[in-house]
Image (spheres, rainbow, N blue to C red):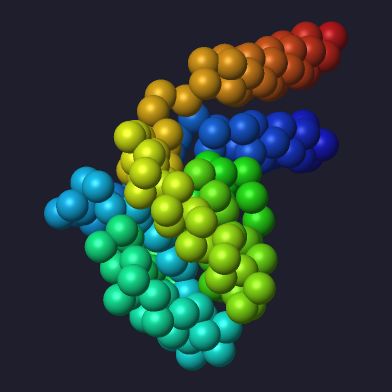
């Protein structure tokens, strides 16, 4: 009975290592940008979030003056699990924690602190900087490309080594148990 418990515990521990070898694929297509000169504002929001509504009102208010310089790409995350998952992936890729919405990215500038009017000048400066940039930042495409990239060989190798060690331990226990029965 004790042997079965040890094997079960080792098997469960081994299963904890295996998920790093297997990744679930989820497809999310980045939006097309008809004007490659425009800066993209990736805006993660909640449908009824008051701060999100204030931020959206701000983007609407600058549409007349800056509308030809940016495209607002919106992702509603409270009612859309795919968008919520995408937001988490973007956070992980950028190594930031939004902590909530609104969460938005303009070029290489991340706005993870929500929205207040004190950010308006910084938002406009980020739009102008990205608009003037020769090489546009596409955080969604970059995030998805990084996710699709082969895993770091070290992580896979570490997982294989751990699984091999568990196999050796289980083999040793089985061998020792078999020797004890012969006596």
In this picture, residue 168 sits left or right of residue 23:
right
The vertical placement of 122 against 117, above or below, is: above
Q: Is residue 55 visible?
A: yes
The quadrant the C terminus occupies is top right
Query: Where 30 sits versus 172, above or below?
Result: below
Q: Quadrant of residue 137?
A: top left
Judge by depth and name the residue closer to the eye, 20 or 181.
20
Q: Is residue 123 left or right of residue 99?
A: left
Q: x%, y% of residue 26? A: 33, 50
Residue 60 figure quarter: bottom left
Furthest toward the left, the residue is 34
Work out which residue is located at the far front of the displayed protein and give it: 65
Side of 161 where 57 appears, left or right = left
> Residue at position x 49%, y 54% from top?
126
Residue at the image point whose x is 66% and y is 56% from the top:
97
User: Is residue 53 shown above or below 178?
Assistant: below
């Amino acid at each position: 009975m004790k042997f079965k418990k040890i094997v079960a515990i080792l098997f469960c521990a081994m299963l904890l290592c295996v998920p790093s070898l297997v990744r679930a694929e989820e497809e999310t297509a980045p939006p097309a940008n008809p004007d490659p000169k425009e800066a993209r504002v990736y805006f993660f929001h909640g449908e009824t979030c008051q701060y999100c509504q204030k931020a959206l009102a701000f983007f609407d208010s600058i549409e007349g003056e800056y509308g030809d310089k940016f495209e607002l790409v919106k992702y509603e995350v409270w009612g859309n699990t795919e968008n919520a998952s995408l937001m988490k992936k973007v956070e992980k890729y950028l190594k930031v924690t939004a902590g909530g919405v609104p969460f938005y990215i303009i070029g290489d500038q991340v706005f993870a602190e929500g929205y207040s009017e004190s950010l308006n000048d910084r938002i406009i400066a980020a739009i102008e900087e990205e608009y003037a940039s020769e090489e546009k930042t596409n955080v969604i495409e970059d995030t998805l490309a990084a996710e699709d990239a082969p895993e770091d060989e070290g992580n896979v190798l570490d997982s294989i080594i751990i699984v091999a060690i568990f196999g050796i331990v289980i083999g040793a226990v089985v061998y020792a148990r078999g020797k004890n029965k012969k006596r």
